[in-house]
Image (cartoon, grey):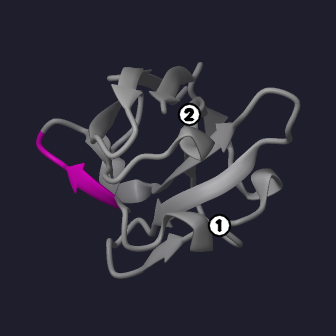
């Protein structure tokens, strides 16, 4: 059973940066598409970005293009979400997700495994 554990959330000022980590256990990172979603208070969980199992393709929500990047460390079986130029609108609980195979990254139903989430709060 694949388990995902996020870390790295916290409080940051607007314009700042933060890096989230997602450790993968029970599976090999290169076998899974990996992604990040977020859920703000009172809103539905929304797609942020994703990378295919091969690493050949990445997908970004328009709201984070040019500011967020996803990367993988196969040796550590860990996925990272680098967030730059943060705004208060980025405040949310961020969830790591894994899928094998990955179909449509933007759809929540495409993902098979989820982490417990980590809170990111951006102050103005």
Q: Cα distance, mark 1 to mark 2?
A: 16 Å
* Number of disc labels: 2
List x then y, in percent, for residue 100.
57, 57
- Quarter of the view holding residue 23: top left
* Image disc number at residue 121: none
Residue at the (32%, 23%) spot, across then down: 8
From the image, tell me which residue sits under label 2: 94
Q: Residue furthest left?
A: 75
Residue at the (18%, 49%) spot, across then down: 74
Residue at the (33%, 48%) spot, across then down: 29
Mark 2, Cα crowd under 10 Å, few <14 / some 14-19 / many 20+, is: many
Does any portion of residue 37 appear in the rendered image?
yes
Q: Is residue 1 above or below residue 49?
A: above
Most common secondary structure along the magenta stretch: strand
Q: Is residue 31 above or below residue 3?
A: below
Q: Residue furthest bottom?
A: 56
Q: Nearer the viewer, residue 55 or 65?
A: 65
Q: Earlier in the sequence, mark 1 or mark 2?
A: 2
Q: Residue furthest front?
A: 124
Mark 1 touching mark 2, by CB under 8 A?
no
SS at badge 1: loop
List x then y, in percent, for residue 107.
78, 61
SS at badge 2: strand
List x then y, in percent, for residue 50.
50, 62
Residue at the (27%, 42%) spot, across then down: 17
From the image, tell me which residue sits under label 1: 105
What's the magenta region?
Answer: 69-75
Q: Is residue 85 left or right of residue 52?
A: left
Q: Is residue 10 left or right of residue 71?
A: right
Mark 1, Cα crowd under 10 Å, few <14 / some 14-19 / many 20+, is: many
Q: In the rendered structure, does residue 6 fall within the stretch colored magenta?
A: no
């Amino acid at each position: 059973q694949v388990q995902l554990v996020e870390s790295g959330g916290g409080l940051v000022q607007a314009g700042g940066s933060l890096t989230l980590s997602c450790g993968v256990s029970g599976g090999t990172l290169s076998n899974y598409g990996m992604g990040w979603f977020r859920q703000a208070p009172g809103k539905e969980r929304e797609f942020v970005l994703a990378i295919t199992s091969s690493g050949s393709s990445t997908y970004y929500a328009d709201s984070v293009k040019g500011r967020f990047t996803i990367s993988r460390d196969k040796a550590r079986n860990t996925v990272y979400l680098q967030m730059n130029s943060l705004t208060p609108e980025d405040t949310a609980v961020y969830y790591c997700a894994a899928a094998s195979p990955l179909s449509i990254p933007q759809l929540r139903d495409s993902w098979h495994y989820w982490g417990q989430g980590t809170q990111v709060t951006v102050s103005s």
